[in-house]
Image (cartoon, coloured by chain):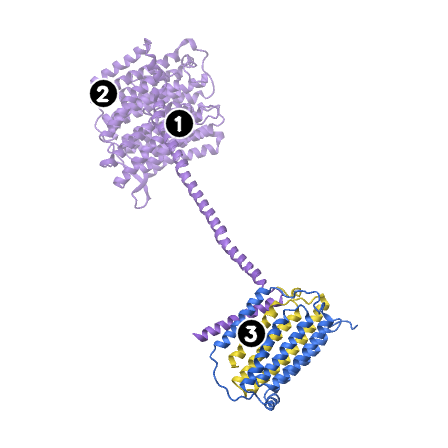
Chain colours: A purple, B yellow, C blue
């Protein structure tokens, strides 16, 4: 059984290597690898449904309480099955999407590598392993976004995605450090420690989840990430990676009990509305879908906060199927019109009716139209949020918004005025297979709500007739808004178009202070420290010069002077030898006289 | 009246005169003459001592004898030197005979 | 000699000796200087006689006369202006020499006068000539020999130095 855990995480990685090794057969090998890698994941789901719970790991730091490993429980089984299935669908689709792409082996291998990391993330046992895979997933995402070498927006999008999530991950690091300092262990299921460290744990995890799930005000990276290939957007940025933030909240429920979950709930509720507004104002289909993803993730936050992990999980699964389908069909339209701008895509739906049918089914699901899957999941979210009136209202507004922002592009796609010719082209079969699978899933997943709750060991999901009715009313309201072309105040529209000024906010609150701080540090360094060091150096020079002066003027002069005086003394003494006899005589007489005097005096005394 | 101090005093004065000559004269021969005077004064001293203190000290008389001899010898050699120097440098002035200066 | 006789000979002789001695250095004539020196040293012999040293006195007179005469010969032969007809002043640095000489002379005289000489006069007779002879030939023979050798060397040396061409030179 533990082997299954490691296989689930390891097989996609092996598949990635094989795909790179044999690029000619890449589509085939990639599909095979994804399929084979999905088998252990489904087996795990079955085992978990039977009640099996497993852990497999090792002590990374012996005696330090830092264990690394994989675990099987209800939550991880559900997640791993979802990831494996969506991954398989997207890989099959990519075989067709990348049909004309010379570097398709690289793209497919990248998708498989991402799958390995994502499986590791959902199966991770303990915050240490979770953090490691969290970061790996971020790296894989950035690499995949930057796939295109021709698109100038690809690299900046990858950079923005990576940096934003990485910055939010500081919260994750702080939380892990605080948790370890407080309890000495990073295992799941612990209660939040008391005091300041506990607050750091709660806040840090919420911030990390916000970053990864593109909640306001950190949501701008998701729009920038749309510069990546559409399969990447489908797999990473709608179904799986961005859902990791929700997964973190679900996994950390005991740690986040209380005010952290409330914060998460508020963030989610506000983002649900904000994301919907942004989605309504975008002119690019993928950006509409990105805003929608942000909004739906906010609803998942509310679900976890108000109703517990099961509510969030159901919506996550339903949303994964629907949003993936929307992106994949958008990719088909992109292939036929070579663009994702709504204006360019006018009428593409009429050209490719099969694709548009799939698009429609998935859109109905996300817009919460019964009896599709996401209707039921969103209904549970709304029912759970009923306890908090503010959240409830925001959820309803978001529901209205989701209907509106999906109807708008659908109308554009179906518009007869832009229709050109029937759809053709290479690779249609795999792509259609992919979108078809998602559409079917969006229908079938309607019934998984209760089993998921069972899997997680929770009581049944909340329902409420009030929320049911009001949700339907909200959907109708959204449709009405679009059909009647309700005018929106231009200021609001402008704000929505520019991501509700989230970037400007971040610039003001983060960038400017940081730059000011670094400028101040530079000044301190140059004026203070450098100046000090310079002064020390110059002081040493002054000392050296004074020493030199002392030595030259003082010591050398003394020594030279002494030598010169000795020399002069010698010269003077030389004059005694004048060669004049009488002087010698005179000196002799004087000497003799002196001796005589001395003798006399010594004799007398 | 004539006593030892007198003799010694006279000898002393004579010594002074000789010294004056030895120091003050430019001609080498005159310097030698001064030296002779000084030696004479010394002899006088000894004779005085002989007379007034140790009359039977024959060694004293011998001393005077030797000094007298050496006076002569010294004068002779001195003159020879002066002549030789005069031949070489045409002068006997000791002011000019200063080649041995340091 | 009796004290009176001694004094009668001593004082004039001494005075004359000092005067002539001083005048040796006051002439500009070398010949006259030599003769004056002869006079001074000869009179010193008289002084010796007055002090009861007959042998030494006579010896002095003899030797000095010979010596000075030779000296005069030399001077006349080799010196320019031996007669001092040009009136050159052969002195230099007169003042310093004079002061020093005066200081020394006066000092010695004062010393002689003031010293407390031991009073031990043993008889009035000076040494016997015989005794001196015995002394020379006996105890002081070695000194005498050396003196003799010195004279010999002096003679040879003097001749060598004085001959034409010097020590190594041509004999012309």
Callout 3 secondary element: helix
Checking the image for residue A324, the label placed there is none
Residue at label 3? B13
Q: Quadrant of residue B93?
A: bottom right
Residue at label 1? A160
The relative height of residue A57 versus residue A428 in the rendered view (above or below) is: below
Q: Nearer the viewer, mark 3 or mark 2?
A: 3
As drawn, is B8 to the left or to the right of A46? right
Tag 2–tag 1 contact (CB < 8 Å)? no
Callout 2 secondary element: helix
Q: Residues within 10 Å of mark 1 (few under 14, many from 20)?
A: some
Tag 3–tag 2 contact (CB < 8 Å)? no
Residue at label 2? A390
Q: Mark 2 and mark 1: span between their CA atoms?
A: 32 Å
Q: Identify the residue at image location x=40%, y=33%.
A: A523
Tag 1–tag 3 contact (CB < 8 Å)? no
Callout 1 secondary element: helix
Exactly how many numbered labels are in the figure?
A: 3
Q: Residues within 10 Å of mark 2 (few under 14, many from 20)?
A: few
- Residue C109, x across and y down, in percent: 52, 74
Where does the N terminus of chain A fall, quadrant-wise? top left
Where does the C terminus of chain A fall, quadrant-wise? bottom left
Q: Mark 1 and mark 3: span between their CA atoms?
A: 125 Å
């Amino acid at each position: 059984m533990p082997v299954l855990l490691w296989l689930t995480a390891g097989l996609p990685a092996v598949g990635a290597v094989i795909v790179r090794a044999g690029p000619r057969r890449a589509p085939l090998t990639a599909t095979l690898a994804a399929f084979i890698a999905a088998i252990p994941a489904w087996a795990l789901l079955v085992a978990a449904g039977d009640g099996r719970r497993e852990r497999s790991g090792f002590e990374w730091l012996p005696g330090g309480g830092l264990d690394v490993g994989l675990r099987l429980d209800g939550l991880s089984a559900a997640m791993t099955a979802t990831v494996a299935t969506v991954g398989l669908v997207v890989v099959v689709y990519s075989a067709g999407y990348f049909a004309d792409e010379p570097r398709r082996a690289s793209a497919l291998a990248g998708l498989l590598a991402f799958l390995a990391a994502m499986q590791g993330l959902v199966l991770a046992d303990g915050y240490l392993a979770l953090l490691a895979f969290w970061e790996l997933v971020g790296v894989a995402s950035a690499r995949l976004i930057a796939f295109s070498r021709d698109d100038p927006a690809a690299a900046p999008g990858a950079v923005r995605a990576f940096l934003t999530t990485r910055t939010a991950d500081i919260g994750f690091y702080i939380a892990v450090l605080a948790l370890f300092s407080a309890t000495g262990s990073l295992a799941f299921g612990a209660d939040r420690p008391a005091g300041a460290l506990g607050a750091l744990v709660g806040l840090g995890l919420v911030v990390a989840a916000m970053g990864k799930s593109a909640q306001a005000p950190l949501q701008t990276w998701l729009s920038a990430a749309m510069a990546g290939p559409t399969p990447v957007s489908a797999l990473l940025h709608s179904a799986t990676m961005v859902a990791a933030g929700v997964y973190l909240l679900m996994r950390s429920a005991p740690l986040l009990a209380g005010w952290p979950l409330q914060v998460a709930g508020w963030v989610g509720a506000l983002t649900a509305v904000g994301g919907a507004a942004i989605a309504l104002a975008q002119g690019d289909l993928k950006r509409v879908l990105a805003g929608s993803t942000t909004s739906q993730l906010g609803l998942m936050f509310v679900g976890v906060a108000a109703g517990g992990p099961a509510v969030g999980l159901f919506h996550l699964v339903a949303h994964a199927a629907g949003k993936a389908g929307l992106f994949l069909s958008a990719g088909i339209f992109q292939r036929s019109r070579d663009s994702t701008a709504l204006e360019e895509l006018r009428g593409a739906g009429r050209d490719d009716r099969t694709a548009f049918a799939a698009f429609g089914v998935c859109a109905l699901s996300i817009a919460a139209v019964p009896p599709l899957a996401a209707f039921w999941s969103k209904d549970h979210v709304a029912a759970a949020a009923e306890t908090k009136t503010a959240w409830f209202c925001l959820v309803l507004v978001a529901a209205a918004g989701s209907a509106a922002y999906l109807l708008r592009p659908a109308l554009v796609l179906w518009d007869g005025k832009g229709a050109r010719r029937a759809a053709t082209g290479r690779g249609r079969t795999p792509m259609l297979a992919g979108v078809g699978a998602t559409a079917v899933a969006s229908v079938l997943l309607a019934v998984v709500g209760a089993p998921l709750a069972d899997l997680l060991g929770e009581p049944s999901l909340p329902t409420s007739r009030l929320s049911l009715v009001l949700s339907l009313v909200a959907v109708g309201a959204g449709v009405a808004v679009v059909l009647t072309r309700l005018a929106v105040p231009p200021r609001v529209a402008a704000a929505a178009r520019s991501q509700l000024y989230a970037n400007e906010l971040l610039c003001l609150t983060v960038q400017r202070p940081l730059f000011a701080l670094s400028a101040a540090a530079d000044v301190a360094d140059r004026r203070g420290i450098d100046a000090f060091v310079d002064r020390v150096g110059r002081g040493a020079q002054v000392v050296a010069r004074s020493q030199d002066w002392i030595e030259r003027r003082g010591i050398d002069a003394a020594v030279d002077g002494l030598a010169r005086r000795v020399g002069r003394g010698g010269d003077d003494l030389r004059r005694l030898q004048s060669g004049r006899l009488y002087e010698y005589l005179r000196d002799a007489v004087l000497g003799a006289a002196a001796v005589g005097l001395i003798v006399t005096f010594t004799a007398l005394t | 009246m004539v006593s030892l101090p007198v003799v010694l005093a006279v000898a002393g004065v004579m010594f002074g005169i000789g010294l004056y000559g030895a120091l003050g004269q430019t001609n080498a021969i005159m310097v030698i003459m001064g030296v002779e005077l000084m030696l004479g004064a010394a002899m006088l001293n000894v004779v005085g001592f002989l007379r007034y203190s140790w009359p039977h000290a024959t060694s004293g008389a011998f001393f005077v004898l030797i000094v007298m001899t050496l006076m002569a010898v010294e004068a002779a050699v001195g003159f020879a030197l002066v002549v030789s120097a005069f031949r070489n440098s045409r002068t006997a002035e000791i002011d000019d005979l200063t080649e041995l200066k340091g | 000699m009796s004290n009176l006789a001694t004094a009668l000979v001593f004082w004039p002789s001494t005075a004359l000796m000092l005067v002539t001695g001083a005048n040796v250095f006051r002439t500009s004539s070398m010949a006259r200087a030599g003769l004056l020196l002869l006079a001074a040293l000869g009179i010193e012999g008289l002084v010796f006689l007055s002090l009861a040293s007959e042998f030494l006195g006579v010896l002095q007179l003899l030797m000095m006369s010979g010596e000075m005469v030779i000296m005069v010969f030399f001077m006349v032969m080799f010196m320019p202006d031996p007669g001092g007809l040009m009136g050159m002043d052969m002195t230099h640095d007169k003042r310093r020499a004079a002061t020093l000489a005066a200081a020394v002379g006066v000092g010695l005289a004062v010393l002689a006068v003031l010293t407390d000489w031991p009073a031990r006069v043993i008889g009035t007779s000076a040494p016997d000539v015989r005794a001196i002879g015995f002394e020379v030939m006996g105890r002081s023979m070695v000194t005498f020999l050396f003196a003799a050798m010195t004279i010999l060397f002096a003679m040879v040396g003097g001749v060598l130095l004085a001959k034409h061409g010097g020590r190594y030179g041509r004999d012309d």
